[in-house]
Amino acid sequence: METAERLIRSTQRLLWERGYVGTSPKAIQRDADAGQGSMYHHFSGKAELARTAIERSGTELRAAAEEQFAGPGTATERITLYLARDRDVLRGCRIGRLTADPDVLADPVLRAPVADTFAWLRTRLAEIIAEGKRNGEYPDRLDPDRTAATVAAVLQGGYVLARAAGDDAPFELAVQGLVDLLRGVT
Amino acid sequence: METAERLIRSTQRLLWERGYVGTSPKAIQRDADAGQGSMYHHFSGKAELARTAIERSGTELRAAAEEQFAGPGTATERITLYLARDRDVLRGCRIGRLTADPDVLADPVLRAPVADTFAWLRTRLAEIIAEGKRNGEYPDRLDPDRTAATVAAVLQGGYVLARAAGDDAPFELAVQGLVDLLRGVT
């Protein structure tokens, strides 16, 4: 694998595990088995490398979500498949965890791919819920933007609860509870 | 205010803003206007001070939540009051944000008050939902543990979405969407 690619993947992994504040250029170079000169040949510094890594993670998250969103089934079925798909729950969300990073939020360039990813996710979920309304699956009074935000929040909050407990169970409960509520209004 | 108390409050604030990884003993001493000797007179180090600060934050979170939980009203009304109470949304949750901190999760002593706070919250919400079932507000099929986890997750995930957007709006949408779903099954 090319050095630049190794640097991006190492940064993706380290941002996921330790966040931006906790990831040093040295740690990235060590993980990627790249020298300092090589890193600064490809990237102007930690910030540019992080932006590239966050954008990559956002693109991967969208592609993974689209696998369930674009599939067959009712809106509730597709949302359930998305929420309940095989996830490494205790690692949490690569994008969501960055919102705990003050340096990411303070830098518009680093925050943009985080904001864009969740804006995309909420828009996509709202489209699916609006489809469900048109098909008569959901009642007219259901607001797609609200419900979409609730679905995205349950996923992110489920990770928080699971990581707090050191156990997947609260994540699974939160997802099942949401699916119960969605079925309840069907 | 006593030095020990100033140290605890500074640590609470710094953990909230910058997390455990991003908070140095020096930063705590500076914020608390306390010397290094004074800090180590009261606490064995950053870990003990952090444990005390996290426990304090957990106690405060419970007391604040109990104000809405113990009040009058139906289950949905009390849950709505809890979710929609005046919050500094963009600061996020003091306890929840610690789940993004690998050093907090790796240390059982630091993780315990985080785990306990969310375990308490989910138990308390499940009690309120079980009350709502007994009063005929919710259908028999509603599972209190699942729904409680969903409510707690929406709050934590709502913070993540709002911080990503740099705007309270996604938090408000997620909460309204959950309240709509709870009312939908009433």
Image (spheres, coloured by chain):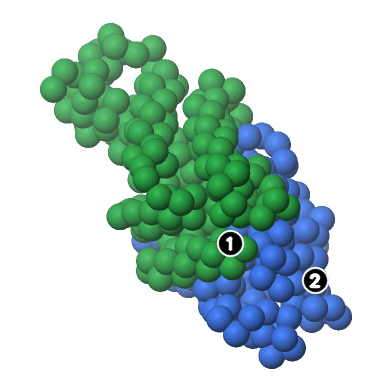
Chain colours: A green, B blue
Subunit ID for the residue under disc 2 = B
* Residue at point 40%, 50% (across, down): A73
Q: Inspect this view and state whether residue A51 appears.
A: yes
Residue B122, compared with residue A11, is above or below; it is below
SS at mark 1 in the image: loop
Q: Is residue B128 left or right of residue A132?
A: right
Front position in the image: B11 or B131? B131
Q: Disc 1 residue type?
A: Thr
* Residue at point 39%, 12% (across, down): A44
Q: Residues within 10 Å of mark 1 (few under 14, many from 20)?
A: some
Position in image of residue A94 (x %, y %): 40, 42
Residue furthest to the bottom in view is: B134
Residue A182, compared with residue B32, is above or below; it is below
Task: Tell me the number on the disc at residue A110.
Answer: none
* Residue at point 68%, 79% (across, down): B138
Position in image of residue A58 (x %, y %): 42, 32
Q: Inspect this view and state whether residue B43 appears.
A: no
Spatial CA distance of label 1 from label 2 is 23 Å
Give the residue at mark 1: A186
Q: Are marks 1 and 2 in contact (CB under 8 Å)?
A: no
Subunit ID for the residue under disc 1 = A
Give the residue at mark 2: B77
Q: Nearer the viewer, mark 1 or mark 2?
A: 1
Q: Is residue A158 left or right of residue A81?
A: right
SS at mark 2 in the image: helix
Q: Quadrant of residue B38?
A: bottom right
Q: Quadrant of the N terminus of chain B?
A: bottom right
Q: Disc 2 residue type?
A: Glu
Q: Quadrant of residue B12?
A: bottom right
* Residue at point 78%, 58% (across, down): B84
